[in-house]
Image (cartoon, rainbow, N blue to C red):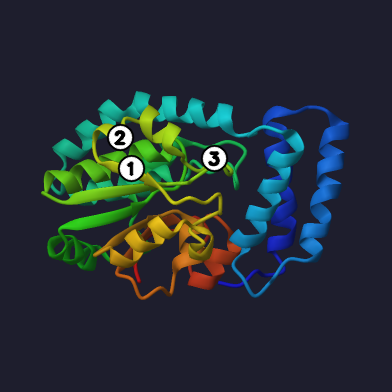
């Protein structure tokens, strides 16, 4: 996926969202916005937008000297953990627990503070359980699960990780070995090892980091150890729009679970904004 014209105002909007997480100092905000501008000037539009977004968030953290999303990540992990018992019961009572867990994992993808300034988790859960999935490759998903002994699960955002835990628990209950992947260091509200511990995921499956602070999974920026595991993976579950941007088209057997939360991605897919997808590669 290439960077389009509409991505440029979104880059600036993401910068403003990040700055308003922790600082109300207008001078700091202005200085960082101005520092971001040259990155847009030199953006490589032949690459997915995730590349430029990564550079922007590196600069923001460097200028602030801290991670502006650390507080909100812990907050939404806590909110999602509060919902976990009822969500777990919803999965348990379902006629198809695996499919319900997938729907809830997609619902959790709404927790994205690179895109939104607030989120309606309850509304997203209701919609995921009641609305049809726009691209629903569930049959090929179940076939891939049946044929695989191990699964590489690329996680996305804090808070959302608790929803992923529901799906990972369903997969491990079917005898699958799941290796979940977090970021190597903070970027946006993406999950790191600290979030995996808070969400209780480290008690469920092996969790590794990809050695990178890149948005999505930019393979050339990840660690050699992670690239080896990616190359050897039988089946990959990829969460989130950033992972879709950076990995779609890969020859690896992959299913992408996400919501189309930007007009550019929705248009690229030929779908309405906000569509839910379980899309096979």
Please give the label number shown on residue 189: 3
Q: Earlier in the sequence, mark 2 or mark 1?
A: 2
Q: Residues within 10 Å of mark 2 (few under 14, many from 20)?
A: some
Q: Residue 79, located in which quarter of the rendered image?
A: top left
Task: Say whether residue 22 is left or right of residue 205.
Answer: right
Q: Residue 167, located in which quarter of the rendered image?
A: top left
CA gap, disc 2 and disc 1: 6 Å
Residue pointed to by mark 2: 202
Residue pointed to by mark 1: 207
Marks 2 and 1 in Cβ contact (< 8 Å)? yes
What is the count of numbered marks? 3
SS for tag 3?
loop
Residue that appears at 22% across and 52% down: 99
CA gap, disc 3 and disc 1: 18 Å
For the residue pair 129 and 199, the one nearer the viewer reads as 199
* Residue 10, percent from left and from top: 69, 55
Mark closer to the observer (3, 1): 1
CA gap, disc 3 and disc 2: 19 Å
Look at the picture and state if 84 lies above or below 264.
above
Residue 128 seen by the camera: no
Residue that appears at 19% across and 50% down: 177
């Amino acid at each position: 996926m290439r960077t389009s014209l509409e991505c440029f105002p979104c880059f600036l909007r993401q910068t403003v969202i990040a700055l308003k997480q922790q600082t109300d100092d207008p001078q700091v905000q202005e200085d960082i916005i101005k520092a971001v501008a040259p990155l847009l000037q030199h953006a490589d539009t032949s690459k997915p937008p995730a590349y430029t977004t990564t550079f922007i968030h590196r600069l923001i953290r460097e200028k602030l000297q801290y991670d502006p999303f650390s507080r909100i990540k812990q907050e939404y992990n806590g909110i999602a953990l509060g919902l976990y018992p009822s969500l777990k019961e919803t999965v348990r009572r379902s006629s198809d627990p695996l499919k319900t867990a997938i729907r809830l994992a997609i619902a959790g993808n709404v927790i994205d503070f690179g895109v939104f300034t607030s989120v309606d988790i309850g509304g997203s859960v209701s919609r995921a359980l009641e609305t049809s999935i726009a691209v629903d490759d569930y049959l090929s998903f179940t076939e891939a699960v049946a044929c695989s002994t191990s699964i590489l699960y690329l996680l996305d955002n804090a808070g959302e990780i608790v929803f992923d835990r529901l799906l990972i628990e369903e997969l491990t209950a079917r005898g699958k070995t799941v290796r979940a992947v977090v970021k190597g260091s903070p970027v946006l509200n993406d999950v790191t090892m600290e979030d995996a511990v808070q969400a209780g995921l480290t008690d469920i499956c092996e969790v590794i980091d990809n050695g990178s602070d890149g948005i999505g999974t930019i393979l050339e920026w990840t660690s050699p150890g992670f690239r080896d595991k990616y190359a050897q993976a039988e089946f990959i579950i990829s969460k989130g729009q950033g992972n879709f941007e950076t990995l779609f088209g890969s020859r690896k057997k992959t299913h992408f679970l996400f919501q189309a939360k930007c007009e550019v991605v929705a248009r690229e897919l030929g779908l309405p904004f906000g569509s839910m997808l379980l899309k096979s590669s």
